[in-house]
Image (tube, rainbow, N blue to C red):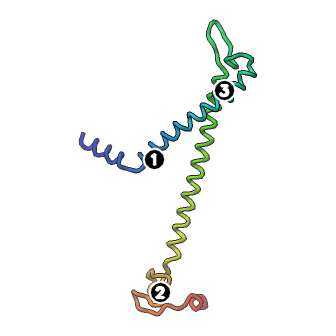
Amino acid sequence: MKKFFAEFKEFISKGNVLDLAVGVIIGGAFSAIVNALIDNLINPLIAMIGGTEIGLAVQIKGQTLNFGAFISAILNFLIIAFVVFLIVKSANKAKELATKNKEEEEEATTKTCPFCKSEIDIEATKCPHCTSDIPEEEEADEE
């Protein structure tokens, strides 16, 4: 039982749980906005097409089949899914750019000594490992 609680504590202490909580809260707020759009703009349009207050609905043996509500739910889902897709796509693009910039920064700060093949600072003129004089970039390219 202690192991279970230790694993749970480790899970909770990770940043992913906080990110998930923020996502759920923002998702709930966004869902309210989409529901307002559906209820106040799209449902009245569907009701105008259907010609009744309910919208596109049929009553069979006392039971109401509300096609308007079903169409509204589909539209609600599609709007939320599209916005989530755009958010994930932009987050992945930002992450990709950050990784690329980090790699470029790392590459630009070091070079390899042509004699001992150790990694040294890009501005070094003498290798700290083998004490060889490092030729200028132009001279190294000519050889």
Any mark on residue 124, and which? 2
Q: Which residue is mark 1?
A: 19
Query: Considering only vertical position in the picture, is 7 above or below 44?
Result: below
Query: Considering only vertical position in the picture, is 80 above or below 124?
Result: above
Query: Residue 54: percent from the left, percent from the top?
Result: 67, 17
Q: Residue furthest top?
A: 61
Mark 1 Cα shell of 10 Å, populated few (<14), some (14-19), many (≥20): few
Q: Residue furthest left?
A: 2
* Identity of the residue drawn at 61% across and 31% down: 36
CA separation, marks 3 and 2? Answer: 68 Å
Mark 1 / mark 2, whichever is N-terminal: 1
Residue type at mark 2?
A: Ala
SS at mark 3? Answer: helix
Q: Which residue is mark 3?
A: 71
What quarter of the picture does the C terminus occupy?
bottom right
Mark 3 Cα shell of 10 Å, populated few (<14), some (14-19), many (≥20): some
Mark 3 / mark 1, whichever is N-terminal: 1
Mark 2 Cα shell of 10 Å, populated few (<14), some (14-19), many (≥20): some
* Identity of the residue drawn at 43% across and 88% down: 127
* Identity of the residue drawn at 54% across and 57% down: 95
Question: Which quadrant holds residue 81?
Answer: top right
CA separation, marks 1 and 2? Answer: 43 Å
SS at mark 1? Answer: helix
